[in-house]
Image (tube, rainbow, N blue to C red):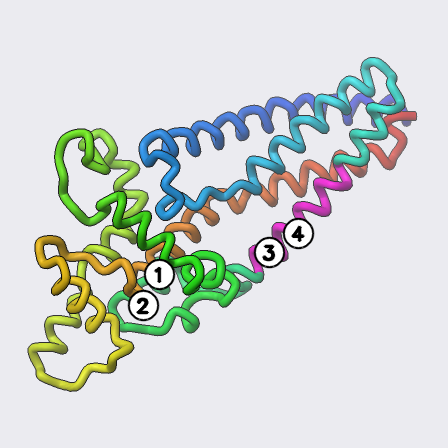
Amino acid sequence: MGMFVRFLLTIWLIGGTAGSIYLLSKRLLQIGIRVVHLHSETCLEDTVWWPTCLLALVCISCILGLMGILCKITFLQWVFSFLVNIGIICVIAVMVWRLLMFGLIRKPIPMAFDEVYRSNSPLDEEYKPMLIDALAADHVWPMVDKCLTDLRFCEEVSGSKKLFGKEDWKIENYYKYFRKGCCEPPPRCAKQFASFKGISDHDDCVKWVNATAKKSEHIKCYDCNSCKAARMATYHTNEDKVRMHSVIIAIFLFVASLFSSMGAFD
């Protein structure tokens, strides 16, 4: 029984090593492309690091596990079991963190963004407090505002200073929420001002008018709720693209732990 389980664990670890190296390389390549294009501008690219860290942990544990089995080194076998247990704890922590950041039942990302952009819905009605505090709170936003201003995000400049070139359409499409929420006034604003009805001081349309009046040559509003919602929607989109990593890693670690507990190292 022990030899059969050891064989299964060996095959499982070989597959885990190959899979984790592939996913880790793909993830690092994706991050690298955006870093090169955007020069590490964190106001646009809030990199989700937990998949990279967990994949690195899985890769290291697989290599140590294989060495422990093939070379029969007890210390490496113990380190493998320890890392697997640490990995399981980290996956559980990530799942709890995601629940706190995004909630169990939530609106689709485009719908939540449009509620803020088109209907002037308050941020705290569409996004969780933890997400707002991390990405759009008062103590965070001045740095984001400065970053967007330095990037001249909403300005169409040419030459080496142009943020997006024709070959960067995938990158530009990735930041569609920023383009809309920070650079295009909501359609309702024109209708509201044309109707001469009273508008609340907290309405985004007032901020759009004030921001445009200061620098009329470029339409932009980096302090508007729609721009803040754009940052959270972009981050949420990035998170959703890698959420399956936690499921895949959890299944792998659970099975590896099961094989280990069944006497694969005996």
Q: Nearer the viewer, residue 151 or 52?
A: 151
Residue 223 lies in quadrant: bottom left
Left of 112 or right of it: where is 88? Answer: right
> How far apart in space, not on screen, are marks 3 and 1 (Cα)?
20 Å
Q: Nearer the viewer, residue 19 or 67?
A: 67
Q: Is residue 3 above or below residue 112?
A: above
> How far apart in space, not on screen, are marks 2 and 1 (Cα)?
7 Å
The residue labelled by disc 3 is: 97
The reply to whether callout 3 and callout 1 are in contact (CB within 8 Å) is no
Amino acid, disc 3: Trp
Amino acid, disc 4: Ala
N-term mark: 2 or 4: 4
Q: Main secondary structure of the magenta part?
A: helix
Q: Which residue is found at the position 61% from the left and 22% from the top?
A: 18
The reply to whether callout 3 and callout 4 are in contact (CB within 8 Å) is yes
The residue labelled by disc 1 is: 229
Q: Which residue is found at the position 53% from the left and 41% from the top?
A: 49
Q: Look at the image and give the residue range highlighted in magenta.
A: 84-99
N-term mark: 2 or 1: 2
The residue labelled by disc 2 is: 116
Q: Position of residue 205 (x, y in %)?
A: 20, 71
> How far apart in space, not on screen, are marks 3 and 4 (Cα)?
6 Å
Q: Position of residue 61 (x, y in %)?
A: 72, 28
State yes or no: residue 94 in magenta.
yes
Amino acid, disc 2: Val
State yes or no: residue 190 in magenta.
no
The residue labelled by disc 4 is: 93
